[in-house]
Amino acid sequence: MITWWGALLGLALAIFLILKKLNPVYSLLLGAIVGALLGGGGLENTVNILVKGEQSVMGTVLRVLAAGMLAGVMMDSGAAETLARTIVNKFGDRLAIFALALATMVITAVGVFIPVAVLIVAPIALEVGKKMHISKLALLVALSGGGKAGNIISPNANTIAAAKGFGVELSQVMIADFIPAVVALIVTVIVARLIRGKGNAVQDDDLEEQSTKVDSSDLPTFKQAIVTPVIAIVLLLLSPIGAICHIQFLTKINLDATYVLPFAAVVGALVMGKGKQIKSFAETGVSRMTGVVMILIGAGAIGATITSSTLPQLLITVIKAGHVPGVLLAPLSGILMAGATASTSTGVILATGSFAKSILGFGVAPLAAAAMVHTGAIVIDQLPQGNYFHVTANAMHMDIKERSQGIFYEFLVGGSAMLTATILYGFLHLI
């Protein structure tokens, strides 16, 4: 058994190295090795712990790679852009902020990565902002907040990690996070409307055409674009729907994301008449997911180091002695890990790998724990040390100072989802 302080030093070292811009995978692996050795694991046992950690994340790796196929189709086919433009056009100018937030939420919810979703919607948002006199700060909050809402109900890497980290189905986490996502969307619209005149206005220079992979004349129709996400969501939700409606044969259809997501992606590509491009869509998806998979490998190592130590039991003892509700460890672990790494997926992976044992030790239901960790991870994942901060700044033509003004408002959005999940599932035990 590794000592608690050795495991804690290893985790602290890994986070410190990530903040110092060392490759996250090597940071996590180095932290795991140092933590295990300092904690008394010995050379041979340290290797065994690392191998055990890698084996524990292989199921998640498969599902993350499967999600990449769906994301590649939605991004490169133009389906995501079609969805965004349709939503914004349908709601019109009067509901512009709501339409932009909803468009980003939907695109993220159907499997597109949140930075990419913001990049897709940003040109539309700037056009609307110029016409309706909405500041770039308000537009940023609308897009980022909508993306956060969609991110917690999406069959993407962080949702998969939350589900598998606590041994529950992906579809269950998506359903549990739906109410927190709706609350986040409402808060997003309220906050963005309140600050619509705060910050810099959209200028003519901001409306310069941005290059996209898909020619506007080659965009699929809305009916074609919606096929992929509808197939994926319906198949993933068959078993939960059967349980809710007491339809016995549906409850026995337990389809996994490993084959549902690629199947939906291929069918969607064929419906859009882009069957010949499936190979390039797959390449895009894999390239997007490679970084997440590598981080999973590093996180598996540091997670195994922590769970093989006395730290989980010590956390339980300390929290009980302080008379602090143990259920709070779930959202707090998500907040801290995602904040430290400025990444939702990395934060969820680290939080579940490192603290799942402690959280469940308080008697928290696995699904409730997954929902609270997951929503906690979107509270401060937009900090400047991460890529999301800079990608969104470039998309909205903001400098660092201007982009930093959005962090607090994004915190309000993420915090509303986290509080909703914690109250509903942590204290009211609704699941």
Image (spheres, rainbow, N blue to C red):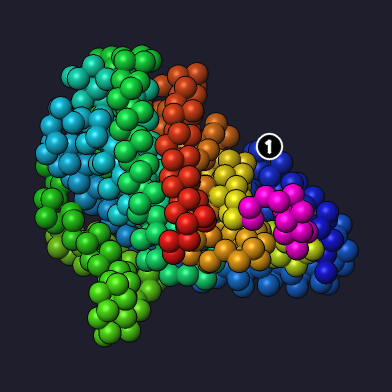
Q: Amino acid at mark 1?
A: Lys
- The quadrant in which residue 398 appears is top left
Q: Position of residue 12 (x, y in %)?
A: 74, 46
Q: Position of residue 325 (x, y in %)?
A: 63, 52
**Could you tell me which residue is drawn at 17 percent across and 41 percent down?**
87
Quarter the N terminus occupies: bottom right
**Could you tell me which residue is drawn at 26 percent across and 41 percent down?**
102
> 139 or 210: nearer the eye?
139
Q: Assign the magenta stretch its main secondary structure.
A: helix
Q: Position of residue 244 (x, y in %)?
A: 29, 72
**Could you tell me which residue is drawn at 35 percent across and 20 percent down?**
195
**In the rendered image, is residue 125 in sight?**
yes
Task: Count the marks.
Answer: 1
Q: Which residue is mark 1?
A: 20
**Could you tell me which residue is drawn at 25 percent across and 59 percent down?**
229
> 363 or 65: nearer the eye?
363
Magenta stretch encompasses residue 350: no
Q: Give the SS element for disc 1.
A: loop
Question: Where 151 sits versus 390, above or below?
Answer: below
- The quadrant in which residue 203 appears is top left
**In the rendered image, is residue 341 in sight?**
no
Locate residue 373 relative to residue 45 in the image: left or right: left
Residues in magenta? 313-326
Question: Where 55 sits versus 410, above or below?
Answer: below
